[in-house]
Amino acid sequence: MKMVTIMAMEMVMVMKMEMEMKMKMAMEIEMAMKMVTIMAMEMVMVMKMKNVAMKKMVMVVEMANLPPSTVISPYLYRKVAVPGVCVD
């Protein structure tokens, strides 16, 4: 009877250790997934910044090709609601 009790206790200990290992692995997988998500978000941000930089470089090159007499000035738009045409 004592031997059966000892074997049952050993089985419970083994099952507990297996459960702890599985929980640890699950936590490690979750952490790895979070890291991959953060890295993907950083890559998207870098790509967006490169896109903006490329657009600015293209604009500078295009401006350099304009005749010297060209006047460039900034302009701003203000939304205006026009009844029957567009609504703000």
Image: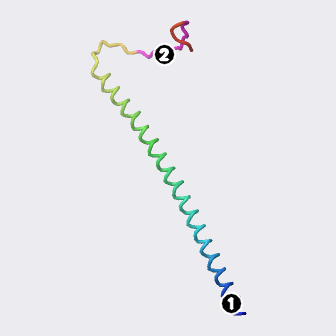
| Disc sitting over residue 76 in the figure | 2
Indicate whether residue 75 is drawn in magenta.
yes
Q: What are the residue bounds of the magenta stretch? A: 73-83
Quarter of the rendering containing residue 25: bottom right
Are the residues at dot 2 and dot 1 in contact (C-beta closer than 8 Å)? no
Disc 2 secondary structure class: loop
- Quadrant position of residue 73: top left
Which of label 2 and label 1 is nearer to you?
A: 1
Q: Which mark is residue 4?
A: 1
What amino acid does circle 1 point to? Val
Is residue 52 depicted above or below 39 in this figure? above
Which residue is drawn at the image coordinates 72% and 93% (left, top)? 2
Residue 31 drawn in magenta:
no
The majority secondary structure of the magenta stretch comes to: loop
Asked which quadrant contains residue 52, the reply is top left
Left or right: 47, with 85 as reference point: left
Q: Residue at x 62, y 71 (%)?
A: 20
- Residue at image position (45%, 42%) is 44
